Amino acid sequence: MGLSVLFVTAFVIGISGALMPGPVLFATVRWSAARGRWAGPLVVVGHAVVEIPLMLALIFGLGELLSAETFVGIVGLAGGAALLVMGGLMLRALPGLRLPTGAEGPNPDAALPIRRIVAAGALTSVSNPYFTFWWATVGLNFMANAAPFGALGYAVFYSGHVLADLAWYAAVSESVHHGRRLLSDASYRWLLGLCALLLMAFAAYFGYRGYVFIASAGA
């Protein structure tokens, strides 16, 4: 996996996860409705604040393992299985999914409580069981794929991952700020359905790469 593929894969899988309704999305809508367009990016800052030390812990705690072919193969299979489950669950949930909206318009005269919004992004991230599960499976697989490139590989992966979050949550925040939707519910479901299929395609790709690494280690 080259650096460009690593970046694109991290972005696509990242935005697929961001699109699913969850605590971080609802925090974005809640604060955007009250305090305007900058709430979304600030929520992402809080989300990143808890992801960076977690990623560093994985890198330094599993440094040698991340370069071992057997380990890379195992986490590849685990990451592929996790993506397959996530894609399946997304497809199953599609009929009832709706894009949340803010109940009130933003108050331009209110001071932006930066610390509170960043804290909301951090707390809604760590309180979500999906967050830990993602990093223990898919995230760990990305770490293994980035390891051969060293610090640059980790930076490329994380840039794609964070930019995906920033792109989606900034769009949601802008939409709520203007009191309208960027997507209809039907369009939102179509987009999520496409992301679910892409996740399942990446699941096959990661699973195949995992099998190749394990076979190579056993040769």
Image (cartoon, rainbow, N blue to C red):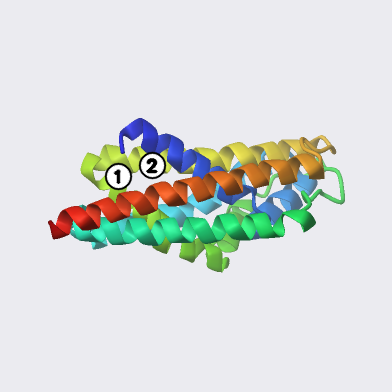
Q: Amino acid at mark 2?
A: Phe
| Residue located at (63% from left, 40% from top) | 168
Q: Amino acid at mark 1?
A: Ala
Q: Label 2, secondary structure: give it.
A: helix
Quadrant of the frame with the C terminus: bottom left
Q: Is residue 3 above or below residue 188?
A: above
Asked whether, in this view, residue 107 is left or right of residue 7, the answer is: right
Q: Mark 2 highlights which residue? A: 157
- Residue 183: name its quadrant: top right
Q: Position of residue 134 (x, y in %)?
A: 47, 60
- On the question of residue 16 being in view, the answer is yes
The reply to whether dot 2 and dot 1 touch (C-beta < 8 Å) is yes
Q: Position of residue 118 (x, y in %)?
A: 58, 52
**Alpha carbon separation for disc pair 2 and 1:** 7 Å
Q: Residue furthest top?
A: 4
Foreground of the two, 7 or 30: 7
Q: Residue furthest left?
A: 219
Asked whether, in this view, residue 31 is left or right of residue 17, the answer is: right
Q: Mark 1 highlights which residue? A: 146
Q: Residues within 10 Å of mark 1 (few under 14, many from 20)?
A: many
Quadrant of the frame with the N terminus: top left
Q: Is residue 116 above or below residue 126?
A: above
Foreground of the two, 10 or 118: 10
Q: Position of residue 53 (x, y in %)?
A: 38, 57
Foreground of the two, 209 or 56: 209
Q: Earlier in the sequence, mark 2 or mark 1?
A: 1
| Residue located at (34% from left, 40% from top) | 155
Q: Position of residue 54 (x, y in %)?
A: 39, 59
- On the question of residue 57 being in view, the answer is no
| Residue located at (33% from left, 60% from top) | 75
